[in-house]
Amino acid sequence: MAASSPGQLYNMAVAELSKYVGDKATDSSVPEHLQGRAFTNYLTTMFFATHSTDRIGSWKAREMRTLCAALDALRTGSLPRLADLLVQRLKACETAITTGDPEAASQLELIPRQDIGLTSIEERRVARRATLVDRKLKNT
């Protein structure tokens, strides 16, 4: 089917996907990155609800999130975003293999960390820096 009718498998997946999550837009300060997140919504609300990220592993979960974000970008016609997502994932895989540090490699990817909570990543960074400064001051 893939050779005789390119895109048909993708269209079938989109049709199946709409049965589960539809294609609701998500509000954001960067709407072009979040509009039409059907694949990502399915992954986070349906798939991860049944298959926990602890069970499948953080590296595989990030890979799936990247693939869903790429498919969402393709679906909305955001080809530059799609290219950026894929090339950064390739760089992350390359870095993880060459350095042996998948956590550092994940910093190259464009998908956000999947920490659950109200505290933003930037707030956590500020808190972490403040904690390190406090420790240094206490030790001097």
Image (cartoon, rainbow, N blue to C red):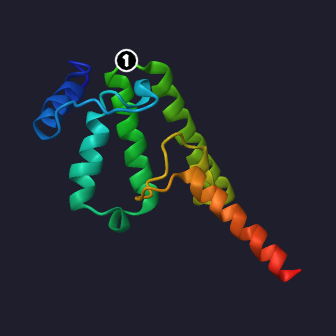
In the image, residue 37 above or below residue 105 = above
Residue 37 point in image, percent of width and height: 31, 33
Task: Report whether residue 48 is seen.
Answer: yes
Q: Nearer the viewer, residue 114 or 53?
A: 114
Q: Quadrant of the N terminus?
A: top left
Residue 59 point in image, percent of width and height: 46, 57
Query: From the viewer's perspective, is 7 left or right of 124?
Result: left
Query: From the viewer's perspective, is 89 left or right of 3?
Result: right
User: Measuring 15% from the left and 33% from the top, which residue is drawn there?
Assistant: 18
In the image, residue 28 above or below residue 32 = below
Query: From the viewer's perspective, is 70 left or right of 91?
Result: left
Is disc 1 surrounded by few (<14), some (14 to 19) or many (20+) residues within 10 Å?
few
For residue 90, what is the image quadrant?
top right
For residue 25, what is the image quadrant?
top left
In the image, residue 39 above or below residue 58 = above
Q: Nearer the viewer, residue 67 or 1?
A: 67
User: Measuring 21% from the left and 18% from the top, which residue is drawn there?
Assistant: 5
Q: Please tell me whether mark 1 sits on a helix, a strand or a loop.
A: loop
Q: Nearer the viewer, residue 54 or 86?
A: 54
User: Measuring 43% from the left and 41% from the top, which residue is drawn there?
Assistant: 66
**Which residue appears farthest toward the right when viewing the image?**
140
Query: From the viewer's perspective, is 24 left or right of 83?
Result: left
For residue 140, what is the image quadrant?
bottom right
Residue 68 point in image, percent of width and height: 35, 39
User: Measuring 24% from the left and 52% from the top, which residue is drawn there?
Assistant: 47
**Which residue appears farthest toward the left when viewing the image?**
19
- What's under tag 1, amino acid-wise? Gly
Tell me the residue that label 1 is attached to.
77
Residue 133 point in image, percent of width and height: 78, 68
